[in-house]
Image (spheres, helix red, strand yellow):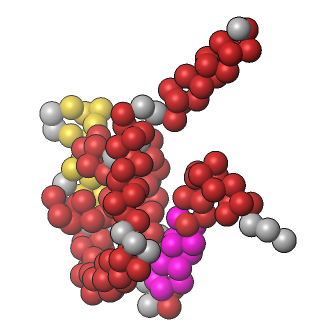
């Protein structure tokens, strides 16, 4: 049986990225489980930003990580349920929440920091082995920032419709 994603090449870009992300997240989850740590890989960005920068708003976290506000809000809820972060109203704007690490979150970071250093080293090695794929992904991000997938598809549909009517 052939592999659809491989057979489709660039046409299956989204599927390949999702597959790789799922594989990386599953392997990370196995490591956390082996180490006896209750930790979800999706939490890392938020926790790392709070550890590096101190308390931050959901909006600031979304901007720093380049992901949506709803995604940060969902992660926030999960982290709060796990007791890793705390949220309080922003004194300047009660509609906003300021997130910070809880004492349990700070302890978790101290415990996981050595493991994260290993993750970093392995990721760098893997990136080098794969031919600096992060540079290619950065170029993809730049191309999408220049013109979104949505805009490209709409443009192509317009070209196809113009060709058909000519």
Is 52 inside the magenta-drawn segment?
Answer: no
Is 27 inside the magenta-drawn segment?
Answer: yes
The span shown in magenta is: 21-32
**Relative vertical location of residue 151 with respect to residue 44 in this rendering, above or below:** above
Q: Can you name the residue that lies furthest to the front here?
A: 166
Q: Is residue 166 left or right of residue 118?
A: right
Q: Position of residue 15 (x, y in %)?
A: 63, 55
Q: Position of residue 24 (x, y in %)?
A: 51, 72
Q: Residue at x 79, y 68 (%)?
A: 2
Q: Is residue 163 left or right of residue 25?
A: right
Q: Position of residue 63 (x, y in %)?
A: 28, 43
Q: Residue at x 50, y 91 (%)?
A: 34
Q: For residue 92, which quarter of the picture?
A: top left
In the image, 62 versus 4, the foreground residue is 4
The N terminus: image quadrant: bottom right
Residue 34 visible? The answer is: yes
Q: For residue 133, which quarter of the picture?
A: bottom left
Q: Can you name the residue that lies furthest to the right here?
A: 1
**Relative vertical location of residue 28 with respect to residue 67 in this rendering, above or below:** below
Q: Residue at x 67, y 21 (%)?
A: 160
**Relative vertical location of residue 144 with respect to residue 87 in this rendering, above or below:** above
In the image, 16 versus 164, the foreground residue is 164
Residue 57 visible? The answer is: no
């Amino acid at each position: 049986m052939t592999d659809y994603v491989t057979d489709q090449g660039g046409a299956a870009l989204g599927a390949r990225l999702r597959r790789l992300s799922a594989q990386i997240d599953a392997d990370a989850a196995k490591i956390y489980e082996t180490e006896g740590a209750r930790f979800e890989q999706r939490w890392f960005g938020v926790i790392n930003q709070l550890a590096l920068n101190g308390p931050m708003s959901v909006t600031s976290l979304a901007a720093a990580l380049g992901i949506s506000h709803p995604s940060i809000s969902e992660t926030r809820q999960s982290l709060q349920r796990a007791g890793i972060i705390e949220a309080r109203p922003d004194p300047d704007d009660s509609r906003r929440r300021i997130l910070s690490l809880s004492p349990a979150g700070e302890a978790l970071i101290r415990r996981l920091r050595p493991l994260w250093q290993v993750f970093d080293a392995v990721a760098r090695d893997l990136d080098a082995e794969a031919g600096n794929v992060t540079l290619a992904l950065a170029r993809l991000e730049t191309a999408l920032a220049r013109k979104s997938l949505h805009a490209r598809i709409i443009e192509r549909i317009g070209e196809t419709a113009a060709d058909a009517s000519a």
